Image: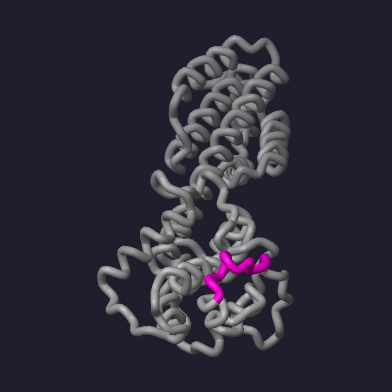
Amino acid sequence: MLPAKADAEFRRYRYPFTSERVLRHAILSGQRTEALQALEQMFSALGETCHSLPRLQSDAIHLMVVLIRKCFQSGAPAEGQMESVFNNAQRIIHAKSRAEVFRVVHSLTDQLLKAVRHHRLRDRRQTARLAVQYIAAHYHRGPSLEEVARMMGLSYCYFSRLFSQETGMSFQEYLTRVRLENARHLLLTTPLTVEKVAARVGYEDPSHFIRVFKRCYRMTPRRFARTDGAAAGVPDPLPVQKRPDAAEPHCAEHSPDRVHIPPAYQVGHGSYGHHLRHAQAHRDRRLPGGGGD
């Protein structure tokens, strides 16, 4: 039987499971402010019901193990974490005060937040890279944002925001740029008609393709092909405001053949344009050629 004082403390003690859940969620979401607030609330709650330093040390080690395990399960890198567990456990065991225990757990929380943020950033970049590859291979059939998001296993809204943040442009703008890059290449290197070029790059309506192309290059595709495009001094595309009834977003200030893609999104050994031409060549082996203009 426990001594009266210990028994009274045991009955009064309540582990703050709710604060622990909030803390776990904040860490796994990479939300530092929320995580540290939850940690403070947790230790505040423990301070009200747990006056024994050994009991607090035990709870702190339990919390440390739970947090690290959850981070591992989320996919965060495990390198060096076992050593961190041992070192932090030793620091907690040898702590001389409650404040010292809190500082150890606070430091560990910061370490885990950094590991999770790094993992999430790498995961976001990988997702954007895969989406870029998918668009380069399938732009001719006009993949939708919903389709690519579903393929990535992400919600429509989250993927849209992620893609814009990682590439610096919207999904639709990126798709349009890829289509126009390939249309320009076909106009300059093949005898395909404008109608067949439009179909090759995913425009069912040639007149719509002509409007989009003209907004970017300030000339029609036919004139572009006749004047040999860039060799004739095609100006950089103008920033065009999207009309309420327009089906495509406006093009940015620089030409589609010079779209800036961060190095993390470069595919294979070549440049962005090389990757697109490789994808086009792969399709050209399967699609019938067109006639002259």
- What residue is rendered at 64% in x and 12% in y? 95
x, y percent for residue 210: 56, 84
Tell whether 232 sits left or right of 38. Answer: left
Res 120 seen here: no
Q: Is residue 121 above or below residue 172?
A: above
Q: Look at the image and say whether residue 233 sits in the magenta stretch.
A: yes
Q: Nearer the viewer, residue 54 or 79?
A: 79
- What residue is rendered at 56% in x and 27% in y? 59
Colour scheme in use: one colour
- Bounds of the magenta span? 227-236
Q: Nearer the viewer, residue 259 or 101?
A: 259
Q: Nearer the viewer, residue 277 or 251?
A: 277
The main secondary structure of the magenta stretch is: loop
- What residue is rendered at 46% in x and 33% in y? 77
Q: Is residue 217 above or below residue 253?
A: below
State the count of labels.
0
Q: Nearer the viewer, residue 9 or 175?
A: 175
- What residue is rendered at 26% in x and 72% in y? 286
x, y percent for residue 119: 51, 40
Q: Is residue 57 above or below residue 261?
A: above
x, y percent for residue 83: 47, 18
Q: Look at the image and say whether residue 91 sits in the magenta stretch.
A: no
